[in-house]
Amino acid sequence: MTNGYAFGQLSQAFLTASTHEDPEARSRADRRAEHWVRVINAMAKGQVAVGSRTPVRGYPSWITLEVMRGGFATGTASGEGPLAEDEIALAQRLGIFPTRQSLFSYFLSEPGLHELYSLLDSGSYRVDIPEDAALLMMAWLVRSGDRAGALDIVDAIAPFAHTLRFAPKVTNEPSSRPELVYRMTAGEAAAVLQSRKLNTRVEAQREALGVWNPFTDRVLEAWRKKYINGRIDLALDESWRAQAAELISEYDKLAERHTLCSKHKKPKENLAILIRAMRTLAEGGHIAPRDAGLVCSVTEACLAKRGAPSDQEHHALRERQRFIASAAPHSRLAAIAAERLAVLEQSQGIEHPEIFIGDVTELEAERANVPVGSSMPPVVPRVVSRATSAPIETLLSDGVVSSSEILGSLIPRISATVVASACRDETLARLVAANYRAFRNRRSLLLVNLQKQVQLSELPWMRAALPHGAATTNEAMAVARRVGALVLDYFPATIIPNPLVRELQHLLAAAGYDVPLVEELAADIFMGRFSDKFRIAAQHATKVIGGTLYARYFAIDVEEVGALDGPRKSAPKPSKMVIRFRASKPLVTFGDLCEARAGHSQAEGWSVARNGTIIEQSQILTTHNLAALVTLGVTPRKPWSELARECISKTASLLELASRQPRPLPTVKDAAYAWRQAVFFLSVSTQDDAEQVIADPSLASTGPAVMATLMAGLRAASAGDPEGQVAHAPFVGWSVGRHWVLDAIGHQSHEPS
């Protein structure tokens, strides 16, 4: 399975690199293909063990690896590769041989330590991967008197100093305030803007409005002098012939210089007809009666449509078109905005983005050859807003954070302040926070046999720093509740994504809470087993959902869940002296219950769809962390019933979308997840609020007709009507075979599940 996945990704990358119309997309795909080739070669040579916590031979688990999509290690560490420009410059400044080993040795010397002290005090460093913090942490420990901890770090990292970079990365400014978050840095935003290219279609239209339309008017005006009483007068005087020759010469020059618009070249187009006849007459030839008739028809049609070029309305139209054509290309304006961002620290966000999206100044206009006062196109504020550095609530309310996945990617910065909050020294707190953010950005490995991803405390420099501070319970819990409330308020209809689950787990661990949170499992690599935390999470959830609408709707037997056993263990071989009088009671595990609820048996064959139905039952039983959030005291700003209404409306819109899609199943799954969230929110609402939502006829009539069926099932569960519940089975997203909801929404495709 792993080889097939890797080869599949390689094939996709090769296809994109060979066929994509965008050169940059081809270049990115080509680099991606190179990485997948490295993955496959490393696997073939035995250098990479897929599924292991230490997949690359010779590297311990704490080293940051280069990891591809799906969790495949390429066999290379992120800190490997040729020396960077700043490393070479540092070696030249020191007058030492430019190798990583020599730079590492320098930072262990007295002058090197003082340079590290200076960076610690100023905060002018960047931690892109955790290894960037190793020598800085060592220096802090030396200065604080913990030489044993510093030596532990050196002992751990020294064997890799000749290959990996541990030298700090210097920046011009200290990092921004920890309470501020941003989706991308100023440097990343500038790169996106700088990469904007001319839109050839827009430029062709600009050329047509600014060049060919005015020129066509002049040609038409010349022919209008010959248009008399519905006929073209072919008696030519020298003045007209000279004007025609001048227009022909100008046409040839324009056609050579302006090549984006090709309409004037088409024989049946107006300008082509007028120019062809004019060229014949200018060269002393005679035009055929048919061509004269065409010139007459074109002249009549143009005058009837827009009037003569000298008419006021015609002139006003051309002025508007000239104004449109004179506007600066969006790519050039985007490049101006990128130059503005160059003055900022490129590794941080932008605290005042409005400064960088104003109209073009006189100096910028002269330098870029664009009109003064040109407004920035929509792409500029859109990209710059992604680099806005502000409190997370501001980014959410402004729409900068548009999904729970994006929210999850930003939480490490908030969490970092908690991890570092109890550090007694400000310089240590700043370094710990920077290291934490880099660590949380590490890509997860593909692991098998329920192994855990590498933990922060496994980094040698963090292990050495632990005695000097740890997060306080109150602050970590406050952030966890804050994050939980944000995801419920802004993204109630989507399940909590794995990165966000992991961040919440770290916060709860820092707060000293042992509340089970579970990740979403991938159906294509699911191996049929759940770790025991899923059972614990399900049993924990029964304290919230027991006796509620949620338990009735999804037919959850709370006592059955409470009686589940832990995962099966390999039984020891019996001794020859042991006499078995009776068979032991068979274990019923969480996985057994999920399989039974999904309607499967262990004897059935493997399939992604089958796995998906089992995983979805695990999400139903655990409420996929919603019950845990309630237990932790997470209180959204909106009432629970309002969140339920939003989820029901989202379900309707997703099913409406699915009815029009060629491959609707992913959208159907999202709709079922939104519906499950709605059922839970109604279960924790007050009884009056829940009943109002369930009885609201507008919710049943919103979207496709199947919504009436779903609401009827909800009413039956609310009323405790067994017959009604049998008639309206719970809405789930996964199905082996064609999903029943596809017929209900009128979808014509017979896409397999």
Image (tube, rainbow, N blue to C red):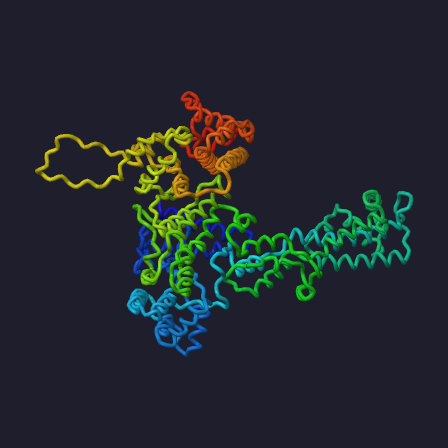
Residue name at image x 76 percent, y 50 percent: 272
The single residue placed furthest to the top in the displayed view is 723
Counting from the top left corner in percent of width and height, residue 297 is at: 83, 43
Is 354 left or right of 164, judged from the image as shown?
Answer: right
Return the residue nearer the eye: 279 or 309.
Answer: 309
Q: Considering only vertical position in the picture, is 488 above or below 261?
A: above
**Residue 624 image offset from top left, x and y in percent:** 40, 40
Relative image position of residue 340 (x, y in whole percent): 60, 63
Against 744, is 535 above or below? below
Quadrant where the N terminus lies?
top left
Q: How many marks?
A: 0
Q: In the image, what residue occupies the spot 83% across and 42% down?
A: 304
Q: Residue at x 34, y 73 (%)?
A: 108
Is the C terminus in the top left, top right, bottom left or bottom right quadrant? top left
Image location of residue 15, percent across then percent down: 48, 50
For residue 189, side relative to residue 321 (left or right): left
- In depth, the one of 289 and 340 nearer the eye is 340
